[in-house]
Amino acid sequence: MLQKLIGLVRRCVEDYHMIKAGDRIAVGVSGGKDSLALLVFLAELRKYNHNPFYLEAITIDMGLGMDFSGIEKLCQSLDVPFTLVKTEIGPIIFDHRKEKNPCSMCAKMRRGALNQALLDRGLNKLALGHHYDDAVETFMMSLLYEGRISCFQPVTDLDRTGIIQIRPMLYIHEKTVDSFVNRSHLPVLENRCPVDKTTKREEIKQLVYHLSATYPDLKERIFGAMQRYPLPAWEPQGRYKRPKEKDYEI
């Protein structure tokens, strides 16, 4: 099953020209299931991808008392260098500033710390663990909360820093990621964020879940519309047949 998932990652990488020979890629590893799965997939893809690339894991310690030793051991087993960047982002947002809507500022500060770590280490690309369901939910959030037809892009060029963000797991469903992580016994960390599971994204996730009971192909239709419309940078180069959740159950 791992090889099938690597195949989906490889197809996504090729469809959107995410990786070039000589790229120095960092995986932003938070300790959640998505980033850990992405780390394993890219470490495996590195072995036989026709465009050879360097891979490193970078974790931003939010200052919430989390233990990242399990991630460090996983990186050692994968032969991937691991960098831990210590910050006080958590205490600043929740204790000092007492932000009522902390998610936007938290994301901005985490991304800033992550981008700086890449620049310090001479890395040019940042691989993020967004999957198929994340894309659908982000599209729905933009539509319902902002009145816009929008989503993050598979490949994003951050002009100010010169860093390019890539999302190689866009062809893999969340349920498939969960199954892979559980069966592989990856060292997933408990999320200590005080507002975990109470965000607008969680509301949309539940909405999509309930709508899918009535419209089973809802996510596939939304994802397909994003590619066919297409949203900026979403038209794939290959003729890709989007997988349904049942196609890759493990």
Image: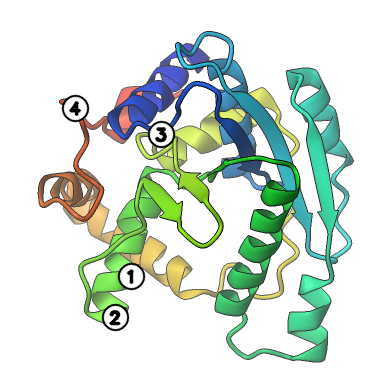
Point out residue 123 in the picture as x, y percentages from the top left corner.
Answer: 64, 40
| Marked residue nearer the N-terminal end (3 or 4) | 3
- Give the class, few, some or many, for how many residues have Cα within 10 Å of label 3's Cα (few <14, many ≥20): many
> Which residue bears the numbered disc 4?
241
- The secondary structure type at the circle numbered 4 is loop
> Which residue bears the numbered disc 2?
146
Of circles 3 and 1, the one toward us is 3
In this rendering, position of residue 90 left or right of residue 244? right
- The secondary structure type at the circle numbered 3 is loop
Question: Which residue is situated farthest in the left direction here?
Answer: 229
Spatial CA distance of label 2 from label 1 is: 7 Å
Spatial CA distance of label 4 from label 2 is: 30 Å
Spatial CA distance of label 3 from label 2 is: 29 Å
Which amino acid, mark 3? Met
Spatial CA distance of label 3 from label 4 is: 19 Å
Residue 22: mark: none
Of circles 3 and 4, the one toward us is 3
Residue 18: mark: 3
Residue located 36% across and 62% down the image: 138
